[in-house]
Image (cartoon, rainbow, N blue to C red):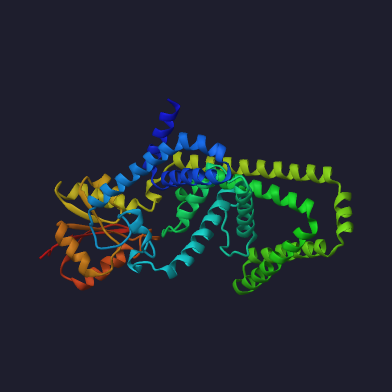
Amino acid sequence: MTWLLCALALLTSLLIRSAGIALVGGLAAWLAVSWLTDRRAAGGRLRIFLPMVVAAMLAQAAWMHWVAAHEFIEWPIGGYPRSYVSQLSVKSGNDPELGAASLVDIPPRVVKNLTERVTGLVSLLAWPGWINPVWSSPMLAVPLILILIGLGGSLWPSGGRVTEWYFLGHEAMYLLWPWDLEMRFLLPIVPLAGLYLWRGGRRLLGWAARRPRRTGAWTALLALPAATHAGISAWRTESMQLTVAAAFWALLALVGLAAASMHGMRLRAAVERLPWPVLVSALSAAGLLLFTAEVGLGIAREARLGRDNLAFDLTARATYPDVEAGRWLRAHTADSAIVMARQVDVVYHYSGRQVIWFPPISDPGPLMEGIRKYGVQLIVINERTWSYWLPPEEDCFAALARAHPTAFRLVAEGPRFRIFEVIARE
């Protein structure tokens, strides 16, 4: 019964797509590595987990085949809403007009995604404010280094557990993901990232205690270029955050150089003379204080969100113009009206009309062809302050209206929305 429940849970996890696929891949990698590192344990693991992995892979393959056979291409653009493989092939999922990606685009994408993911992790765990996305910032470099050390220590020499391979698979997939970061892409692995962060810090302190000179040399070797880069970046951008970062790295480099230059016996004696019980107590107290502060800040942020939800103001939301447009459509159009809008779900909910997605296409040709093909009668334009899709619909419609100046008529207008009737579909 337990095996059946686990198999069912694994198959069900595929419904959450990327996280589920990463779990299946992590299980497969864990079984393969187990066969290389611990044959005795690998046999039992294969008997238990291999049938689950095979069943999950077959289910995923069947689903991908069905989707490919029944795929409906609404608009001639790459990426969404096509398959994940198709989405990986574009330069930017948010701006599909940039076209297909090449191998040259992959390294910048990985660097961008890594920067965004570390920044997002730090903002969730410790720093809710803005973080300068420069790798000489300690708020990016230090967490990444500690996570890599903690993850490496968890993998070597035992080969790790399924959690490590799930984490690796999940992150490898999202480092190649062509979309801007959304917190939902990060949340599944935040607990594991926090675990490896802690393990990396503990391992680094252990190294420093056992090999202080070598640790000091490596610290200086890493800190000096980081201090130089942060200093140059601070001078160019006049960023106080990077100025503090340069000072942090410079101080760390001085400490590392001092430790590396001392004679081994003198350094070891100096390390042994340190009041370790007092230092450990101070560090423990500081850690407890930091943890308490983080919990307090988290509770305060949740309470603020709760208050906002209790006093929910729909008019202040970015999608409210779509709400107004939907309500106008419900009151002033026939039930059979066909509408084109960027925010399909909101406009459909409030209008009750058939809604065609307004794609991020600035070329008037394909847009007008789609309007004719789907019999679009009305077009909703939300004048957004920030657009998830690029180009924004108002830019796309402006190009369309310039190409077909007599094809549209303004029939409704609000503070941040306009509705146009299509009066010439021939």
User: Residue 252 versus residue 351: which sits nearer the camera?
Assistant: 252
Q: Is residue 128 visible?
A: no
Q: Position of residue 378 (x, y in %)?
A: 19, 57
Q: Residue at x 15, y 70 (%)?
A: 406
Q: Quadrant of residue 139?
A: bottom right
**Residue found at x 34% / y 68%:** 99
Q: Residue furthest left?
A: 426
**What's the residue at 26%, 66% (across, down)?**
397
Q: Is residue 199 above or below residue 75?
A: above
Camera-side residue of 204 and 181: 204
Considering every residue shown, the one lying at the far top of the view is 1
Q: Is residue 77 left or right of residue 19?
A: left
Please state which of residues 135 and 20 is positioned toward the viewer in this rendering.
20
Q: Considering only vertical position in the picture, is 46 above or below 184?
A: above
Answer with the quarter of the image where residue 299 lies: top right
- Give the quadrant of residue 403: bottom left
At 26% from the left edge and 47% from the top edge, which residue is drawn?
66
Q: Quadrant of the C terminus?
A: bottom left
Q: Position of residue 371 (x, y in %)?
A: 18, 61
